[in-house]
Image (cartoon, helix red, strand yellow):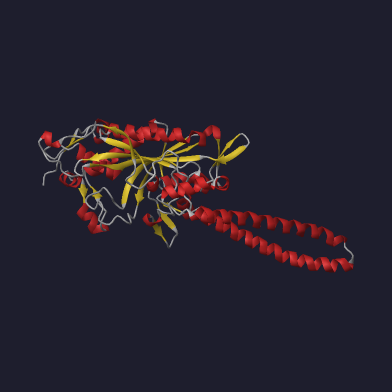
């Protein structure tokens, strides 16, 4: 959530942020009113409570005649205090409900607009000219089936559409990617983590996934648990309700977990293969930092993602995501998009988001610097979303005979294999 002091002192900035996101601007004024009522109801409760305490001191000293009148007044005050307490609780709840609906304040440098209004910041690598090489590229599913690596048919039979099996060398390729990603993250100073896939509502709400993103979240109603769509959720909640000494920052974690997404609103989109699926594995970087270091950490996360994709020898571009395509928690987000030959365009493989103090306030994660205690900043960055990375690897490194060259960075994790060969049918 945002800092309420910012809302009170500069509501126009909050309105501008909501407008840029394409979100409800009237929510700002509703929250201002609710905050004013919350504060005034708190003052009213305190006044009545103090009056009640003062009256309590007078009763023992009063004459019998005075005591009767004071006791009568005390009964009325008791009822008034109870009513004021209830009004204060109601006002608090209403203000919190509205505050949780408000997205993070977007960074001033974020391009304004929708999904297609991003700005390309960098381009890396060389796109292969398959025509010049004398063959038509196959898509990842055709390649994966020939390699004995992907089985969509049985995935659909067992679990339905957008599910799959990684088999044989496909399973080995996932394990190689995960181990290589964790090795890079560990070398960069991240602590490897295996995180829960089920979380309580507060963890999901605290990271900002029960607002605009709620339609893509799987909820187990009987147990009131949520299946995470990213290990960002359990990593953000790891230090929930804790105060961390400033000299221990930054804290960096690399989480590996299964991820579950409903993919609501994507009917007919990316239905072929494993680019957009309901379940996948991912290595996610997560940082807790001093707010003063948040922007620099954001750039560092991006550099680690660029290092990863460069090591995989993939052509990619870096984009500054537009305001209307930001998640509720992010003030700014950079995506790395890899070139997918058979689609003829760049597609998102990784993202790095600066959430400032938004998640920390919701999850009560604070830092202590001397006597000062304040929310810290959280950031997250995808290092390897496995299926999409496999898509990019197969298509970009395919050879004319249907085999696939293995980038050098992965070879130690694949028993030294330099090429993945089609299996005999």
Q: Please state the horizontal and vertical placement of residue 215, each as a whole percent of the image.
A: 38, 57
Q: Is residue 338 left or right of residue 78?
A: left
Q: Residue at x 74, y 64 (%)?
A: 77
Q: Tell me, yes or no, if residue 290 can be seen here.
A: no
Residue drawn at x 38%, y 30% is 187
Q: Position of residue 223 (x, y in %)?
A: 44, 60
| Residue 153: quarter of image | bottom left
Residue at (53% x, 54% y) in the render = 29
Q: In the rendered image, which quarter is residue 63 located in?
A: bottom right
User: Nearest the camera: 76 or 27?
Assistant: 27
Does residue 34 appear to the left or right of 422 in the view shown? right
253 left or right of 180 in image: right
Left or right? Give the position of 66 relative to 201. right
The relative height of residue 353 versus residue 44 in the rendered view (above or below) is: above
Q: Position of residue 15 (x, y in %)?
A: 49, 49
Closest to the observer, 264 or 26? 26
- How many circles with numbers are drawn on the protein? 0
Q: Nearer the viewer, residue 423 or 17?
A: 17
| Residue 198 seen in the current view | yes
The location of residue 369, given as percent across then percent down, is 59, 35
């Amino acid at each position: 959530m945002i800092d309420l002091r910012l809302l009170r002192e500069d509501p126009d900035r909050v309105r501008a942020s909501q407008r840029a996101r394409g979100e409800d601007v009237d929510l700002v004024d509703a929250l201002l009113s609710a905050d004013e009522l919350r504060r005034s109801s708190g003052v009213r409760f305190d006044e009545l409570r103090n009056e009640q305490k003062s009256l309590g001191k007078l009763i023992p000293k009063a004459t019998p005649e005075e005591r009767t009148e004071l006791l009568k007044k005390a009964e009325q005050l008791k009822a008034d205090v109870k009513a004021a307490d209830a009004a204060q609780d109601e006002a608090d709840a209403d203000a919190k409900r509205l505050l949780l609906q408000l997205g993070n304040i977007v960074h001033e440098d974020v391009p304004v607009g929708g999904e297609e209004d991003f700005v390309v910041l960098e381009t890396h690598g060389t796109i292969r000219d398959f025509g010049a090489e004398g063959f038509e590229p196959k898509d990842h599913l055709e390649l994966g089936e020939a390699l004995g690596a992907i089985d969509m048919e049985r995935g659909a039979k067992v679990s339905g559409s957008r599910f799959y099996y990684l088999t044989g060398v496909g399973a080995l390729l996932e394990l190689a990617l995960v181990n290589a990603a964790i090795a890079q993250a560990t070398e960069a100073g991240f602590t490897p983590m295996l995180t829960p896939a089920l979380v309580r509502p507060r963890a999901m709400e605290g990271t900002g996934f029960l607002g605009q993103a709620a339609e893509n979240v799987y909820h187990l109603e009987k147990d009131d648990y949520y299946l995470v769509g990213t290990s960002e959720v359990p990593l953000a909640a790891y230090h929930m309700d804790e105060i961390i000494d400033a000299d221990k920052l930054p804290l960096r974690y690399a989480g590996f977990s299964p991820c579950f997404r409903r993919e609501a609103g994507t009917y007919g989109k990316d239905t072929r293969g494993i680019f957009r699926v309901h379940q996948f594995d991912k290595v996610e970087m997560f940082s807790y930092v001093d707010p003063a270091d948040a922007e620099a950490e954001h750039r560092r996360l991006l550099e680690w993602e660029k290092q990863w994709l460069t090591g995989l020898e993939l052509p990619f571009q870096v984009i500054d995501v537009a305001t209307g395509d930001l998640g509720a928690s992010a003030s700014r987000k950079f995506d790395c998009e890899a070139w997918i030959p058979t689609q003829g365009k760049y597609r998102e493989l990784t993202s790095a988001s600066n959430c400032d103090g938004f998640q920390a306030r919701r999850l009560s994660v604070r830092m202590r610097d001397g006597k000062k205690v304040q929310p810290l900043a959280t950031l997250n960055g995808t290092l390897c979303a496995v299926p999409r990375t496999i898509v990019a690897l197969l298509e970009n490194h395919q050879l004319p005979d249907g085999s696939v060259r293995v980038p050098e960075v992965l070879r130690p994790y694949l028993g030294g294999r330099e090429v993945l060969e089609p299996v005999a049918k």
